[in-house]
Image: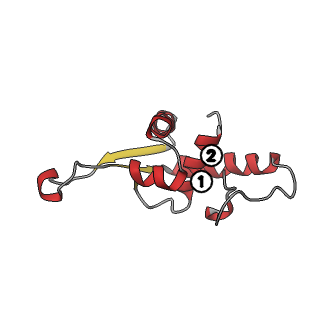
Amino acid sequence: MRLTIPVAKVLSALLADPEAPRYGLDLMKLTGLPSGTLYPVLHRLQAAGWLAADWEDVDPVAAGRPARRYYRLTGEGVRAARLALAELRALAPPGRASRGGAEPTGAPAW
């Protein structure tokens, strides 16, 4: 998996709470990525086996919105994401200042 900045942002957001299912709009807010960048990343992660995706079981009429597709890291995805982000952090120059608020699970703020 090629670890681009958008991929690192998505992985960091998902690793903040690996058990929590996230949907697209939620991930766009967490990462600051537009949908045209986010969804191709999600598809690549899913194709690599790092991400599982399931449709919400909800009646759109009763909910007043379309069903959401929820994403979560697989066990392999959690391991691979942690390793990939650790390798990326190791490449960052020492003393690099954080670019924004709190960083989930010690991950860099991309």
In this orientation, which residue lies closer to the viewer: 29 or 42? 29
Q: Amino acid at mark 2?
A: Ala
Q: CA distance from mark 2 to mark 1?
A: 6 Å
Q: Is residue 56 left or right of residue 95?
A: left
Q: Is residue 1 left or right of residue 58?
A: right
Question: Is residue 36 visible in the rendered structure shown here?
Answer: yes
Residue 106 image point, x, y percent = 68, 63
Single out the residue that lies furthest toward the left. Answer: 61
Residue at which label 2 appears: 8
Residue at which label 1 appears: 12
Single out the residue that lies furthest toward the bottom. Answer: 102
Residue 65 image point, x, y percent = 21, 52
Rendered residue at 48%/40% (across/down): 38
Q: Amino acid at mark 1?
A: Ser
Residue 59 image point, x, y percent = 14, 53
Mark 1, other Cα within 10 Å: few <14 / some 14–19 / many ≥20: many
The answer to whether the residue labelled 2 contacts the one labelled 1, judged by CB atoms less than 8 Å apart, is: yes
Helix, strand or loop at mark 1 = helix
Rendered residue at 50%/33% (across/down): 44
Rendered residue at 17%/56% (across/down): 64
User: Which label was assigned to residue 80?
Assistant: none
Helix, strand or loop at mark 2 = helix
